[in-house]
Structures are given as structure tokens and as C-alpha cells.
Image (cartoon, helix red, strand yellow):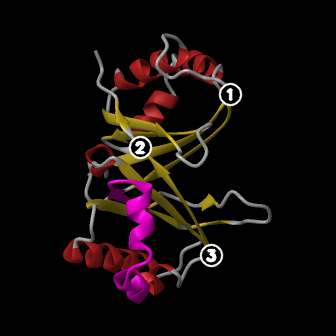
Amino acid sequence: MASPVTEITTVTLKPNIDLEAPGPWLDTLATIASQDGYIGLQYGRQLEEPDMLMLLIDWTSLAKHQQFIDSPIYGDFVKRFGAILTDIQIYHVETTPFPPAILTKSPCIEFATFYNIEPGFLENLGKFASVLDEAKPKEFYGGALGPVVGEITQPKEGATAGNAAVLFFGWESREAHAAFRNTELFANNIFLLREKLGGAKVFHVAFEEYLSK
């Protein structure tokens, strides 16, 4: 049986795009939500770079997303979606738990992608998440994590494609995450995320769940 996946789409928005206004963006969401195999979606701007939009779509399988890509309507969909963006990057992740409900159950998501991971890194990532689940740091909501399907490339000059993993941690705020980084708990366990990988990118997002009408 095929595994469900979360599509992770990173969109570089054109300047001054209003995501609440009727038009290409809301049409994009409605089209996605009408597809066979669609489960749900969440979106939000990166707090550090507001012109970077994260769109996360839960599918019953990777094949269902591919079915949408291969459909007759996809060309027009891409044209309309393209009206609000200058760049787009897409990959998929198999999260535990699925779907990653933490995305909309906490005010702020720490969104971390780990690139060029080696054997053993996913186990370390799970250990780090378990430490937080057990210790329950102040203003921590929980998390989800998983491997990326296929290889991806870190967005930096000279990077090469490799295996990757994604971690979502829910916090009350960016400040709560920053405060955790100053704790003994963090200092004693961060080594788990600094071994067996080539690099990482971390930012924060306040996700909104799309509710189809």
C-alpha cells in the first residue's frame, strides 16, 4: 500500500501579493482541494522572509499528486498560480505522525530541513524529538518529522543532491524557541542534529489551515 505524503512547496512571491484577496491564490487553493487524493493543506509566510510562502499539501499518496500533474487542467493551473510567484520548489516528505497536525495546532512552527543526511541521522532526529516530548519544554507544543522522498539539493552554491529529512516543532512563538536554545536540555542534546549531515536550514512559519468552501 502506498504511503501518504506531504508535498512541501516553497514559493517566492512577487512583491505586494495579498493572499486574502480574490484571485490566483485563492483559485489555486480551491483547485488543489478539489483533486482526488487530497487530504488537506496549510500555508503561511516565513516569518524571517515574508515573501517566501510555504504551501504544504497532504496527499493519500505520491501517485495522487502525480495524477494531478498529469491531468488536462494542470497547465492552466500552473499559469494561474504562476501569476503571483517568481520561483517555486517542490518536494515530498513522509511524516510521523501523518498528517502533521502540529502545523496548525501551534502558533509558530520551527521548520527545519536537513540536507545530505547519512545513515543514522533519522534515528538521531527521532531521539531529539523524543527528548523534547518527554521533557516538555516551556511553550512547546510537539512535533512531526520524516524523510524526504528522493534526493533534494540544499539551496546554496555548490550544493549537491542527497537524502534529506524535515522536522516540524510547534512553539508558542519564535521567542519561545530562542529561549529553549539557551537551556541545558538543548545544550546536552543538540549534538544529535549536528552529526551525519551536510547542512540545514531553519526558519519559522505561522501556518493557516485552508478550509474549502
**Residue at the top extreme of this rendering:** 22
Quadrant housing residue 37 = top left
Question: Can residue 32 be spotted in the picture?
Answer: yes
The amino acid type found where label 3 is placed reads: Gly
- What is the C-alpha distance between the residues marked 3 and 2? 27 Å
**Closer mark to the observer between disc 3 and disc 2:** 2
Q: How many residues crowd mark 1 within 10 Å: few (<14), some (14–19), many (20+)?
A: some
> Judging from the image, what secondary structure is the residue with disc 1 in?
loop
The amino acid type found where label 2 is placed reads: Ala
The amino acid type found where label 1 is placed reads: Lys
> Judging from the image, what secondary structure is the residue with disc 3 in?
loop
Q: Of the two numbered discs 3 and 2 on the same chain, state the one appearing first in sequence.
A: 3
Question: Residue 158, position in %: x, y?
Answer: 79, 65
Residue found at x 52% / y 59%? 150
Question: Residue 173, position in %: x, y?
Answer: 38, 54
Say which residue label 3 marks. 198
- On whether residue 12 falls in the magenta region, the answer is no
Q: Of the two numbered discs 2 and 1 on the same chain, state the one appearing first in sequence.
A: 1
Residue found at x 46% / y 19%? 20
Whether pointer 2 and pointer 1 mark residues with C-beta atoms closer than 8 Å, the reply is: no
Is the residue 119 above or below the residue 34 in the image?
Answer: below
**Closer mark to the observer between disc 3 and disc 1:** 1
Q: Which residues are magenta?
A: 167-189
- Marking on residue 206: 2
> Judging from the image, what secondary structure is the residue with disc 2 in?
loop
Say which residue label 1 marks. 14
- Marking on residue 179: none
Is the residue 116 above or below the residue 111 in the image?
Answer: below
Would you say 161 lies left or right of 42 here? right
Along the line of sight, the residue nearer the viewer: 191 or 71: 191
Residue found at x 46% / y 38%? 44
Along the line of sight, the residue nearer the viewer: 81 or 5: 81
